[in-house]
Amino acid sequence: MYFRNSTRICVIFLYVLFVYFARIKALDEGAECNIPNGQNGLCTPIPKCQFVLNLLKPKLLSKETVTFLQALKCGNVGSTVLVCCPSSNVRSPTNPDEPIGPEPNIDSSGEKPSGLLAPPECGLSPLSTPKIVGGINAHLGDFPWMVALGFKNTRNPQQPRWLCGGTLITKNHVLTAAHCVRDDLYLARVGEINLYKDDDGAHPVDIPIAKRIVHEGYAQNRYLFDIAILVLSRNIDGIENTGPICLPWESDLRTMSYLNHHLYITGWGSTIHRGPTTDVLQVTNVPIIENSRCKEQYTGLSDINDTVLCAGVGKKDACGGDSGGPLMYGKKTDDNEIGFYLVGVISYGSGCANPNYAGVYARVTFFIDWIREHII
C-alpha cells in the first residue's frame, strides 16, 4: 500500500538525485523537450509528471532506472526541478492537501479495483493440470486469450503475415510488446488454434485494430518498457473459444518474485532459431531465474532491471514470432480450478533456447497501474 509520506520521500530523493548528479538544461516549464527514448515531451515539475511518479513506485530503484531518471532533467523553476515528461502524462495542478504521488490502485483489503477482472470473469482454462513438460501443441480453447497479430503482406494482401502474439486482457484490449507495434500491424485474430487450416474445429475471427497505445518510456534500441495495448474495433462477445486472461492485481501476485516457478508461454513462433513459424499454437513452461543472473548474461547487450522478468532453460524458450505473447502463472481458484494470470510479455532473447541467455519478458506487475489507466 502506498502512503502519502512515502511518496513524498521518493520525490525528495529524486530532487536530491537531480541536484547533485544531473546536468542542468536551461529549459522553461512547458518547453518542448526530448525524452531519452526519442519521444517528444514537455518540461514539467516532477509532481505533475505521472510517468516519473510511476517509475518511483518500486521500493528499490535499479541503476538503469536511476540513470534514466537523471537523463529526464530539463531545467529548474526556482527550487523546483523540471523533467521531460510525455505530454499525455502531465497532470493538472494538485490541491496542496492532496498527495503529490499517484493514488494507490491496490490496497491490502483484497478488493478488486474497478476495471480489472478476477476469476471466473477471466483466466479460466479447461486444462486439468498446471504442469507441461516440453513444448507441445495446445488444444483448442486451452488459452482463449491468445491472439495472433496480423501484418500487411505486400506479396499476398489477402494473407496476413502472423509475426507477433498478444493477450486479451479485456473483451476488446490486447496486451503485446511495444516492438510489435509497427505501421503494417492492422489485424488481431482471436479464437484460433491452427493459423492455416480451416478443418481444425476453430471458428476464428479477424478483428481490425482501432487504436495503439505504446508505453511512453519505450526505447526501441534498448527494449526498455517494451509493452503496448491494442484496442480492437469490436469486442469478443459471441466468438467461440475466446476470453480474457486475469491480470495480477492482487497484492500477493504483485509482490511475488515467481523465482523458480515454472510459468507457461504460448505462441505460433519458430521452434528453432531462424526456422519457420509453426501452424499450431505451441505451449511450454519455463522457470523464472534471478534478474542478477540474467543481468550477467546480458552484460553489454541490454538493460536488465526491475521492469523485466527473465526465464528459460535448456531447449525451452520463446522464439521468433512469439514476441508480444504471454508469460502465464497458473493458480488454483477457490473452486479448485486453475486461474491463469498474465505476469510477463515476451520481449526478446539471444537466439532461441540458447543455454547461455534467458528469455526476457516485460514484467506486467510493474505496469499494472499504467495498464489500468488505459483500459478503463
Image (cartoon, helix red, strand yellow):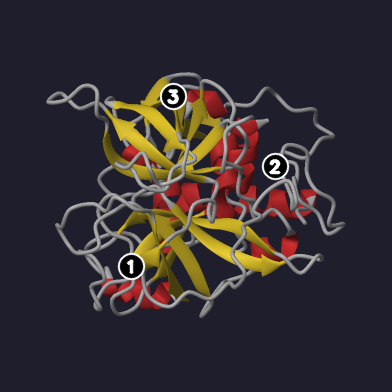
Number of marks in picture: 3
Q: Is residue 151 above or below residue 371?
A: above
For this rendering, which residue is in front, 9 or 201?
201
| Left or right of 362, for residue 299 | left
Furthest residue in direction right, as rendered: 109
For this rendering, which residue is in front, 315 or 311?
315
Q: Secondary structure at mark 1?
A: loop
Q: Earlier in the sequence, mark 3 or mark 1?
A: 3
Name the residue tied to disc 2.
101
Mark 3 packing: few (<14 Cα in 10 Å), some, or many (20+)?
many
Question: Residue 214: which quarter of the image?
Answer: top left
How far separated are the C-alphas under marks 2 and 3? 33 Å
Q: Name the spot of residue 126 as percent of width and height, x first.
A: 62, 59
Q: Earlier in the sequence, mark 2 or mark 3?
A: 2
Q: Earlier in the sequence, mark 2 or mark 1?
A: 2
Please name the amino acid that badge 1 sits on. Asp
How far separated are the C-alphas under marks 3 and 1? 28 Å
Q: Name the spot of residue 276 as percent of width and height, x first.
A: 17, 53
In the picture, which quadrant includes the N terminus?
A: bottom right
Name the residue tied to disc 3.
209
Q: Is residue 371 above or below residue 288?
A: above
Q: Secondary structure at mark 3?
A: strand
Point out the frontmost of discs 2 and 3. 3
| Left or right of 248, for residue 297 | left
Q: Name the spot of residue 79 as percent of width and height, x first.
A: 58, 36
Task: Tell me whether the residue at label 3 lies in contact with that at label 1, contact meaning CB atoms closer than 8 angstroms.
Answer: no
Name the residue tied to disc 1.
317
Q: Is residue 2 above or below residue 115?
A: below
Residue 42 shows in this picture = no
| Left or right of 253, for residue 99 | right
